[in-house]
Image: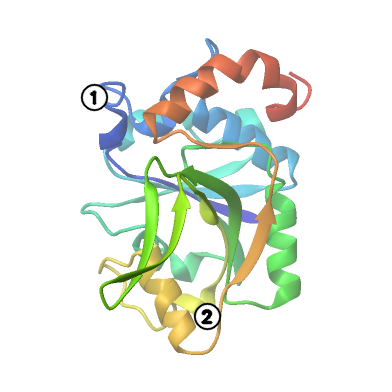
Amino acid sequence: MHAVILAGGKGVRLRPYTTALPKPLVPIGEQHAILEIVMRQLAAAGFTSCTLAIGHLGHIIRAYVGNGSQWGLRVGYATEDSPLGTMGPLLTMLDRLPEHFLAMNGDVLTDLDFGDVLRRHREAEAPLTIATYARQVNIDFGVLNTDEGRVVGFAEKPSMDYRVSMGVYGVSRDALARYTPGLPLGFDELVLDLLEAGTPPQAYEFDGYWLDIGRPDDYDRANAEFDARRGMLIKGA
């Protein structure tokens, strides 16, 4: 079981925290970097190896993680010299990856079972499996439905429910074979291409704990809640 951790972004949304630290190394609580939590979770879920796709401040990540032996993982690295999007880094290492693997952002704080995502991906024989999470947006205005200049519906401050990508994916190499290594490839482009080809991604619906640490509000919430959730996020801690 192999995972690729996408850790090359600049973390612009999380400045000033990411001025001197790469986003995956920002601290959660007072003891752990988010990347350490992810590595511990991967090992506990049965993963034995992973590749870190690094770029911005990547030398700091290398120094922190090393070969991964402290977490029982074999860790390799792939360097992103220029921004390649969410999926682009996978193309540069595709010949070194197994047929099915997990890919995930390096700033995800969740109790999702990463191993189950990969197992379900294999079973579905899908080109891509996307872990999804329910979100709700409250709209602060009255919303009008109009048709040719007439109001045909109205809702006062409604809420909208939808599912978002958690930044965790089961990936099959065949889904990426058509793309050129070294060129950018976004998650959005890959999904739209799969839909157009009639080979839609599989959804892995999850309703547990998930925060996108790249969002300042979620980062602050993660620090506020971490002590209470430590045992859930780091087994045995």
Q: Sequence order check: which comes first, mark 2 or mark 1?
A: 1
Q: Amino acid at mark 2?
A: Asp
Residue 231: quadrant of the picture? top right
Label 2 belongs to which residue? 174
Q: Position of residue 125 (x, y in %)?
A: 68, 78
Q: Is residue 212 above or below residue 20?
A: below
Q: Is residue 225 above or below residue 134?
A: above
Q: Is residue 96 above or below residue 157?
A: below
Disc marking residue 217: none
Left/right placement of residue 70 relative to residue 67 reads: right
Q: Position of residue 113 (x, y in %)?
A: 72, 46
Secondary structure beneath disc 1? loop
Q: Nearer the viewer, residue 120 or 172?
A: 120
Q: Position of residue 127 (x, y in %)?
A: 57, 76
- Disc number lying in front (2 or 1): 1
Q: Is residue 133 above or below residue 32?
A: below
Q: Which residue appears farthest toward the bottom when viewing the image? A: 197
Q: Position of residue 38 (x, y in %)?
A: 58, 36
Left/right placement of residue 94 relative to residue 133 reads: left
Q: Please rate how many residues cluster around mark 2, counting C-alpha atoms within 10 Å: few if below 14, some from 14 to 19, many from 20.
A: few
Please report the residue visible at 56 percent of the width from the left and 80 percent of the height from the top. 200
Q: How is the image coloured?
A: rainbow
Q: Please rate how many residues cluster around mark 1, counting C-alpha atoms within 10 Å: few if below 14, some from 14 to 19, many from 20.
A: few
Please report the residue visible at 42 percent of the width from the left and 63 percent of the height from the top. 90
Left/right placement of residue 86 relative to residue 116 reads: left
* Number of marks present in the image shown: 2
Label 1 belongs to which residue? 19
Give the CA distance from mark 2 to mark 1. 37 Å
Q: Which residue appears farthest toward the right when viewing the image? A: 236
| Residue 92 in sight | no
Residue 18: quadrant of the picture? top left
